[in-house]
Amino acid sequence: MKFELPQVVFSKIFRAVVEFELIDDGDKILIGVSGGKDSLLLTYALACLKYRTKKNFSLTALTIDPKFTDDFGDKVSRVAKFCRELDIPHEVRAVDINALIREQSNKSPCFTCAYFRRAAVNRRACEVGANKVVYAHHLDDAVETFFMSLLSTGQLTTFMPKTFLDRTNLTVIRPLIYLREAEIEKFAATRGLDVLKSPCPFDGATNRQRVKNLIVELEKSFPDLFNHLAAAMRKNSIGQLWDAPKTRQQMHETYFSFKG
């Protein structure tokens, strides 16, 4: 296969790989591929990196069937075909996330889905001897997570481009972290990727989608909002902030100095 990535796309992925030291010689990398535009680009880009660079690493792919629909098995055959064309081994694992969401109705469906998907992917990575797991999270995902965390918990936090999981001895990497979602959509359309529609019954009605919509709406009044949120995720962006709140014990002496 002839690998053709737009230079701007390849450059952003390569920058992430170099800046965050995502790929090393000897890595065995398991790709979490759902069949959506993001994971298909990720899979294609990693095959391209393997072909175009001197790094010696291997790839294998896994798709989780969450049992949201009865015809997912038929649709995922298109993902298997895509991986075969890239010479990447691919398999499907069924995880009845649909039932798990019903059983854990007191928890967010997104939390339950993400938790059991990650667990299944990590388990398979260990079974095949992979040392890294790669996901297709992009810059929009990171910014939305950052903003959602601020709105929901009052904390300034998001996921990292590279995370070591000490329980499984796996490293999670995200090479698409500098790509905007619009860039991925454009590539998928131009390249004619056979993108699967998300089978999630909550698709388009999640807190993440609400935050995504909120950012778009706020950008009408604050055009640089997205870029400023992205900049705020960096540790060197911290300006003047209050100290952490003191405990009653820490304030005890000062308190009684006013009482005489």
Image (tube, rainbow, N blue to C red):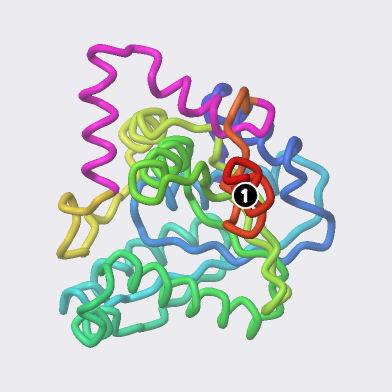
Q: Position of residue 18 (x, y in %)?
A: 75, 37
Q: Is residue 145 left or right of residue 220?
A: right
Give the residue displayed 25% in from the left and 51% down from the top: 207
Q: Main secondary structure of the magenta part?
A: helix
Q: Position of residue 84 (x, y in %)?
A: 49, 63
Q: Which of the pair 178/248 is nearer the observer?
A: 248
Q: Quadrant of residue 110?
A: bottom left
Q: Quadrant of residue 186?
A: top left
Secondary element type, mark 1: helix
Which region shows up in magenta?
A: 208-236
For mark 1, what is the residue?
Answer: 256
Give the residue displayed 70% in from the left and 41% down from the top: 17
Give the residue displayed 48% in from the left and 71% down from the top: 118
Type of the residue with mark 1? Phe
Residue 47 in view, yes or no: no
Q: Residues within 10 Å of mark 1 (few under 14, many from 20)?
A: few
Q: Is residue 213 magenta?
A: yes
Q: Is residue 40 magenta?
A: no
Q: Is residue 163 left or right of residue 223?
A: right
Q: Position of residue 202 (x, y in %)?
A: 17, 61
